[in-house]
């Protein structure tokens, strides 16, 4: 009996993207998935929840986990919960990527802490050196050698998440290292983040972009209502929660100019993302002691008791 050549097995696995704040984890995730999934912002610590981005590479489904940055000062309960969530994401993953910023002279405290964590856990990672568009070759090789010498990396990829340079090579290298098995998500699914949450994140990103240094740290956005109309358009009502009455005028701006501009930008982004006309309505409200509220943590998928 002639043997039929077997089809290669399907593969599926979780890949955690670890790295200090601002190294470009969310940018890389969006690039790998080819759609806006996680939130990219020039400010640090904008990623609070674990976001899944799902990509297909050949017969492999790669499920990326975007972790909140693992950072040092864990005084606040919210910070501690974010650090715990990041390490949980790492422990659950089949493969780890550690991202560093090529434009920084040395890896920094946060990266050092992650390296220690890897060592303690006895795990290896793929080193991803990002932002190579910003640096010359020699210092890049120096950084690469120095990190590789830790013995914690299986290999090194140099990429620019911003331009896409080297990103495809990384995806191609990841796929065969994931376990053989059925796909865990439908083929057309890009993220497991519910649309309401995603819509709130889009507005929060605009607030981050437009409020710059003045941004109240513990600001959140929640989607209150979502109505779909026969003509295909959607009406989305959101509430922007701040901690104190005194923060309201900052968010509103002079004669409401700032919230208007945030609303317009978020609305345009949502329309692009949802591929339909969107009417976005924003309200600013005060919610005190946000960062200590147990419910907020649960809503964000974070553990309060760490
Ligand atoms: P995260 O905190 O690690 O998720 O970092 P983000 O993805 O939010 O990126 C932080 C900042 O670095 C943003 O301003 C990005 O536009 C920028 N960035 C990310 N990747 C690159 C890159 O490859 N080159 C350059 N020049 N900037 C980048
Ligand atoms: Mg991020």
Image (cartoon, helix red, strand yellow):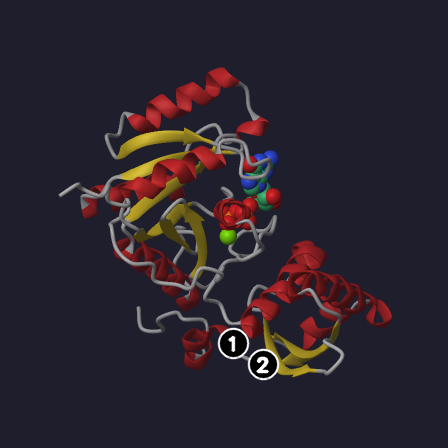
| Ligand 2 closer than 8 Å to label 2 CB | no
Which of 6 and 100 lies nearest the eye of the viewer? 6
Residue 287 circle label: 2
Q: Is residue 169 above or below residue 34?
A: above
Q: Residue 155, percent across and down?
A: 31, 30
Residue 290 circle label: 1
Q: Is residue 108 among what the camera can see?
A: no
Q: Residue 165, percent across and down?
A: 54, 31
- For residue 184, what is the image quadrant? bottom left
Q: Looking at this rendering, what residue extends furthest in the front direction?
A: 1
Q: Looking at this rendering, what residue extends furthest in the top direction?
A: 138
Alpha-carbon span between mark 1 and mark 2: 6 Å
| Figure quadrant of the C terminus | bottom left
10 Å crowding of disc 1: few (<14), some (14-19), many (20+): some
Which of 127 and 240 lies nearest the eye of the viewer? 127
Q: Ligand 1, what quadrant?
A: top right
10 Å crowding of disc 2: few (<14), some (14-19), many (20+): some
Q: Residue 29, percent across and down?
A: 49, 49
Which of 181 and 89 lies nearest the eye of the viewer? 181
């Amino acid at each position: 009996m002639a043997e039929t050549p077997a089809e290669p097995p399907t593969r599926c696995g979780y890949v955690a993207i670890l790295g200090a704040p601002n190294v470009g984890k969310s940018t890389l995730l969006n690039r790998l998935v080819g759609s806006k999934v996680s939130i990219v912002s020039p400010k640090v610590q904008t990623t609070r929840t674990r976001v899944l981005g799902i990509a297909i590479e050949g017969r492999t489904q790669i499920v990326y986990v975007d972790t909140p940055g693992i950072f040092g000062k864990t005084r606040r309960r919210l910070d501690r919960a974010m650090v715990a969530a990041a390490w949980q994401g790492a422990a659950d993953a089949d493969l780890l990527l550690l991202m560093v910023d090529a434009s920084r002279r040395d890896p920094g405290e946060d990266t050092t802490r992650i390296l220690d964590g890897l060592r303690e856990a006895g795990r290896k990672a793929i080193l991803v050196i990002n932002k190579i568009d910003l640096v010359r070759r020699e210092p890049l090789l120096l950084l690469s050698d120095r990190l590789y010498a830790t013995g914690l990396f299986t290999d090194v990829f140099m990429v620019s998440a911003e331009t896409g340079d080297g990103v495809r090579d990384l995806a191609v290298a990841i796929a065969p290292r994931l376990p053989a098995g059925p796909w865990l998500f439908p083929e057309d699914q890009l993220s497991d983040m519910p649309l309401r949450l995603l819509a709130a994140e889009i507005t929060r990103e605009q607030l981050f972009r437009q409020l710059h240094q003045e941004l109240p740290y513990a600001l959140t956005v929640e989607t209150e209502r979502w109505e779909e109309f026969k003509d295909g358009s959607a009406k989305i009502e959101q509430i922007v929660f701040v901690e104190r009455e005194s923060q309201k005028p900052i968010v509103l701006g002079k004669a409401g100019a700032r919230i208007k501009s945030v609303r317009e930008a978020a609305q345009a982004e949502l329309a692009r993302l949802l591929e339909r006309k969107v009417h976005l309505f924003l309200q600013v409200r005060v919610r005190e002691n946000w960062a200590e509220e147990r419910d907020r943590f649960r809503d964000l998928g974070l553990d309060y008791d760490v």
